Image: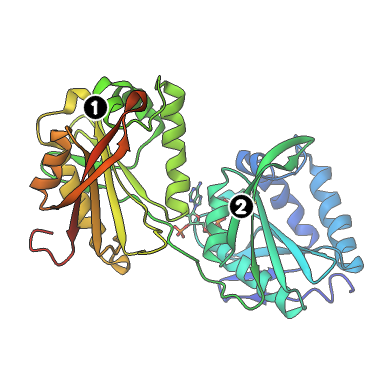
């Protein structure tokens, strides 16, 4: 191909992909000073003017001429807003890479640009487009998810950045697949009640989470928790909530004091991708010791039930049936289920592990969307 004459211009009407020009050097250089750019891509650090100049005047044209890299400038709001590139590989497959200027983020620019580039790749005969990102790049993962990339896997040390191996996510989309999100990526809405505020967990909650989960009663009834439970465990739990949401597996809220915002406990709805029944969900919870005995969990669970039974199109979890389990002897937890209208459906024998190799019976509860108290 001749550069720039043969570079196709593609547009959604809002976002346009076009050949780079020398006028892009300055804004591209500026974009590459951004900390997020440096954190999540393989650009040189420090990033010098010469890097931008060489990339745009030598490497990009050479890529088009040789046919081994097709890089476009992304134009948005009348300005250069970033770069996206396709790198064909043998066998009608290839990879995509992208970055957008900080000022243009959060406007759907990359989602639009990625759909254009992927559509072009398929027109050129590709069977599959592969996306890769370092683990933790949630913005990039969400863009890929929005454009239909699927079957995501994490490969430990699968990527390399400036000579250092990093964990990597890989996902892809095939020619015959829709460029639409696969599965749910849940949000954590703030839910205010008279007595509690439900909100996303954040890193500043880690100390309270650790206190709550190291507590003797929590340890007794939730035998799956690490023991001893340390600050690291709490930080890991809070971090892992992102994956829980993005994979569609579940939603966890911090139950917070409406006045101080301090964490009082945690409530989750999980197993949302249950293979047999994807319309069910399980409710689980624990309270900080200093928040127990005053109705905090009953109120939190009531709020979560409302959200769980709200249709997905209205921002809820679209559940039809909720289940809840509480061990024999855990009266407080059974009470939370009862006051929220759950029906006691039975008792599973020796079903839940306790500490020191003991297995306790477990009381089972359920709540259907058709129940009058739901
Ligand atoms: C990742 C990046 C390309 C996103 O570009 P963008 O134009 O902001 O993307 P869009 O506006 O099309 O979509 C972003 C979506 O991700 C979400 N998002 C953005 N940052 C996020 C974050 N840190 N965590 C979770 N979601 C995030 C946005 O809310 C939006 O979703 P929504 O429209 O449903 O609300 C941009 O942040 C970037 O250039 N980062 C640095 C370079 C980089 O990481 N490149 C990819 C390397 S694999």
Residue shown at the point (17%, 57%) measured from the top left: 367
Return the x and y of residue 196 as percentages of the image width and height: 17, 39
Q: CA distance from mark 1 to mark 2?
A: 35 Å
Instruction: Note whether 264 is above or below 93 in the view shown.
Output: above
Q: Earlier in the sequence, mark 1 or mark 2?
A: 2
Which of the 4 image quadrants contains residue 114?
A: bottom right
Q: Nearer the viewer, residue 359 or 249?
A: 359
Q: Quadrant of the N terminus?
A: bottom right
The answer to whether any part of residue 229 appears in the image is yes
Residue shown at the point (11%, 49%) measured from the top left: 340
Q: Which mark is residue 153?
A: 2
Q: Secondary structure at mark 1?
A: loop
Position of residue 63 in the picture relative to residue 157 (left or right): right
Identify the residue position indicated by label 1 in the image: 288
Neighbor class of circle 2 (other Cα within 10 Å; few <14, some 14-19, many 20+) is few
The answer to whether any part of residue 85 appears in the image is no
Residue shown at the point (53%, 48%) measured from the top left: 138
Q: Secondary structure at mark 2?
A: strand
């Amino acid at each position: 191909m001749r550069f720039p004459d043969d570079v196709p211009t593609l547009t959604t009407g809002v976002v346009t992909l076009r050949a780079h020009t020398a006028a892009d050097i300055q804004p591209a250089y500026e974009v590459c000073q951004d900390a997020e750019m440096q954190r999540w891509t393989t650009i040189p650090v420090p990033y010098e003017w010469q890097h931008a100049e060489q990339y745009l005047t030598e490497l990009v044209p050479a890529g088009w001429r040789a046919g081994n890299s097709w890089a476009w400038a992304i134009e948005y709001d009348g300005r250069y807003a970033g770069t996206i590139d396709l790198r064909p590989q043998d066998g009608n497959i290839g990879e995509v890479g992208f970055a957008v200027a900080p000022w243009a983020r959060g406007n759907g620019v990359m989602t639009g640009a990625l759909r254009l580039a992927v559509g072009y790749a398929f027109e050129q005969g590709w069977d599959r487009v592969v996306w890769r990102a370092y683990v933790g790049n949630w913005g990039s993962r969400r863009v890929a998810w929005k454009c239909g990339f699927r079957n995501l896997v994490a490969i430990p040390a699968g990527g390399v950045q400036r000579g250092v191996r990093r964990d990597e996510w890989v996902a892809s989309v095939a020619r015959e697949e829709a460029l639409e999100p696969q599965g749910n990526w849940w949000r954590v809405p703030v839910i205010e009640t008279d007595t509690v505020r439900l909100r996303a967990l954040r890193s500043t909650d880690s100390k309270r989470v650790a206190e709550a989960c190291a507590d003797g009663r929590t340890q007794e009834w939730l035998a799956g928790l690490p023991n001893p439970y340390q600050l690291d465990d709490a930080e890991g739990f809070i971090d892992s909530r992102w994956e829980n949401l993005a994979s569609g597996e579940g939603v966890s809220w911090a139950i917070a004091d409406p006045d101080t915002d301090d964490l009082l406990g945690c409530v989750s709805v999980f197993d949302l991708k249950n293979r047999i029944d994807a319309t069910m969900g399980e409710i689980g919870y624990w309270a900080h010791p200093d928040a127990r005995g005053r109705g905090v969990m009953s109120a939190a669970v009531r709020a979560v039930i409302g959200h769980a039974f709200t249709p997905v199109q209205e921002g809820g979890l679209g559940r039809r049936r909720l289940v809840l389990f509480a061990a024999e002897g855990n009266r407080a937890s059974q009470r939370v289920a009862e006051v929220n209208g759950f029906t006691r459906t039975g008792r599973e024998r020796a079903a839940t592990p306790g500490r020191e190799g003991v297995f306790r019976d477990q009381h089972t509860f359920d709540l259907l969307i058709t129940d009058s108290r739901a």
